[in-house]
Image (spheres, coloured by chain):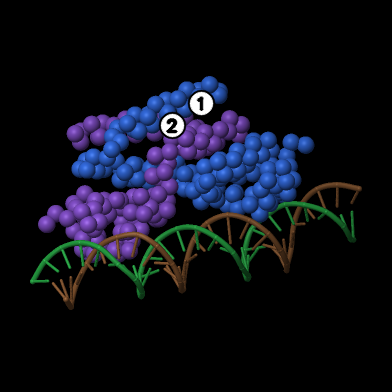
Chain colours: A blue, B purple, C green, D brown
Amino acid sequence: MDALTIHEAAQTTGWSARMLRYIESVGLIDAPRSDSGYRLYGAPELQRLRTLRELLSDHDIGLGEMGFAQRLRSDADLRDAIDTWFAAQPERPSDIPESDWLRFEQDKHERLLAAAAQLT
Amino acid sequence: MDALTIHEAAQTTGWSARMLRYIESVGLIDAPRSDSGYRLYGAPELQRLRTLRELLSDHDIGLGEMGFAQRLRSDADLRDAIDTWFAAQPERPSDIPESDWLRFEQDKHERLLAAAAQLT
DNA sequence: GGAACCTTGACACAGCCGTGGTAAGGTTCG
DNA sequence: CGAACCTTACCACGGCTGTGTCAAGGTTCC
């Protein structure tokens, strides 16, 4: 009983079956497959689907944006290029010094690392 | 001679005047204004416009994505929420351990901090 | 073996995005 | 003062996105 079929998963998560396939095609949530190729949604996938839905509506972003966020985290070159572009204006200093959020980011990553360590 | 008008800036950067205004509306590059409200593009703005163009074509992303990237760096809540969503699947361990890129990120931020320090 | 699922692939369609153009009005400058 | 700029605010339009639906075919199960 711990693996729902696509329509059942749709029902309990509030997505449509079509959207579940779409989400998979975007690369955000891949459901494991049965021997014959049926998608099987277990507890982790259902959880992610629900939190995804929350995340999108809470912050008013779309699947496209999430796809981009994912690309950002898998493509180091892109991440660096964008960071560099935003960081690079030594002239006209902005009202918020760049080093502030950099420091903040680093702190956050330390927090995430600590949290991740506690998961194992 | 160190401030170009919008059409001149368009000419030398390869954008259209229309796009320069659009880029500003997205919040990526705000040109300073003259007393009467004319946009004035100085060397820093021209530089950013050129590198922006490069960035977009090199990585095949659009202004919308850049806008989202900017939102990511200014909205700590959003950043944390997305990071948490991607990080949260202790079940089904992914092939690339999460802590790897976290560590990588932290290293990168240290590099960026060092680079920023050298700018001043 | 047939009903009720699942699969992929395609067509459809509203809505937003990038981009251009134009209109109505202010500014600069010869 | 008139030409040639600039401003904002709209309309237009092709293309991509999100979403639905349908078709053709495989799977499960009573």
Left or right of B37 in this view: A64: right
Give the image location of residue A52, x and y in percent: 58, 41
Using residue B10 as the reference point, say whether residue C11 is left or right of it: right
- Residue A10 in view, yes or no: yes
Residue C26 higher or lower than A108, as above or below = below
Indicate the quadrant containing the N terminus of chain B: top left, top right, bottom left or bottom right: bottom left
Q: Position of residue D11 (x, y in %)?
A: 46, 71
- Comparing B58 with B45, the one in front is B45
Say what secondary structure mark 2 lies in: helix
Residue B93 on image: x %, y % = 57, 33
Residue displayed at 25% across by 56% down: B37
How far across and down, in percent of the image, does residue B46 sit? 23, 54
For the question of whether residue A75 can be seen, the reply is: no
Question: As drawn, is A11 to the left or to the right of A54?
Answer: right
Quarter where residue D24 is shown: bottom right
| Amino acid type of the residue tagged 2 in the rendering | Leu
Q: How many marks?
A: 2
Q: Secondary structure at mark 1?
A: helix
Chain of residue at mark 1: A
Whether labels 2 and 1 share one chain: no
Task: Say which chain tag 2 marks.
Answer: B
Q: Amino acid at mark 1?
A: Ala
Q: Which residue is painted at 42% across and 41% down in the image? A: B72
Decide if residue B84 is on the left or right side of residue A33: left
Give residue A116's mark: 1
Residue at image position (66%, 39%) is A46
* Marks 2 and 1 in Cβ contact (< 8 Å): yes
Disc 2: which residue? B102
Q: For the residue carrying disc 2, how many other residues have a C-alpha within 10 Å: few (<14), some (14-19), or many (20+)?
A: some
- Name the image quarter holding the C terminus of chain B: top left
Q: Nearer the viewer, residue D13 or B31?
A: B31
